């Protein structure tokens, strides 16, 4: 994703090493968008998102757009992602066209 984002002109990219790191970075840094892999060590992407959304309830901070990154886009996974508070999906393997489309959709919907 980093290389694809850079090829689309996005250079300010932060990478988390695992789900705990992702959560920690999300509560300490304002991101425009987070691509949250569902399968990460230490804490999966669903749990990190739920924990982040719980944090927002106590702080009243503005929510970051969270896009699920997954190889499995079953209806069950979609439901679980939306229930966790995610805003959309991108399916692995990720290509530049799909990534550009999701970024354009986010920009359009503000």
Image (tube, grey):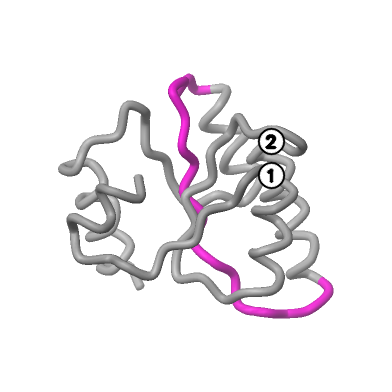
Residues at marks 1 and 2, CA–CA distance in whole angstroms? 5 Å
Instruction: Give me the disc on residue 69.
Output: none
Residue 9 at x, y percent in the picture: 20, 65
In the visual, does 110 lie left or right of 30? left
* Residue 103 drawn in magenta: no
Q: Which residue is mark 2?
A: 44
Residue 109 at x, y percent in the picture: 32, 67
Q: Tell me the quarter of the picture where residue 107 sits.
A: bottom left
Q: 10 above or below 80?
A: below
Q: Helix, strand, or loop for circle 1?
A: helix
Q: Which residue is mark 1?
A: 19
Q: Helix, strand, or loop for circle 2?
A: loop
Q: N-terminal of the two: label 1 or label 2?
A: 1
Q: Nearer the viewer, residue 68 or 15?
A: 15
Badge 1 crowding class, 10 Å Cα cut-off, few under 14, some 14 to 19, many 20 or more, is: many
The stretch in magenta equals 58-75
**Farthest-out residue, right:** 58
Residue 18 at x, y percent in the picture: 66, 43
Quadrant (top left/top right/bottom left/bottom right) for the C terminus: bottom left
- Residue at figure coordinates x 68%, y 79% from the top left: 61
In the visual, does 33 lie left or right of 18? left
* Residue 63 drawn in magenta: yes
Q: Tell me the quarter of the picture where residue 30 sits.
A: bottom right
Residue contact between numbered discs 1 and 2, judged by CB atoms under 8 Å: yes
């Amino acid at each position: 994703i980093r290389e694809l984002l850079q090829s689309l002109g996005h250079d300010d990219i932060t990478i988390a090493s695992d789900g705990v790191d992702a959560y920690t970075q999300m509560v300490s840094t304002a991101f425009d968008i987070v691509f949250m892999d569902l399968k990460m060590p230490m804490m999966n992407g669903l749990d990190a998102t739920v924990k982040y959304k719980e944090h927002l309830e106590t702080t009243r901070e503005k929510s970051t757009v969270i896009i699920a990154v997954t190889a499995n886009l079953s209806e069950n996974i979609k439901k679980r992602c939306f229930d966790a508070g995610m805003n959309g999906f991108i399916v692995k393997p990720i290509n530049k066209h799909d990534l550009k489309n999701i970024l354009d959709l986010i920009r359009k919907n503000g």
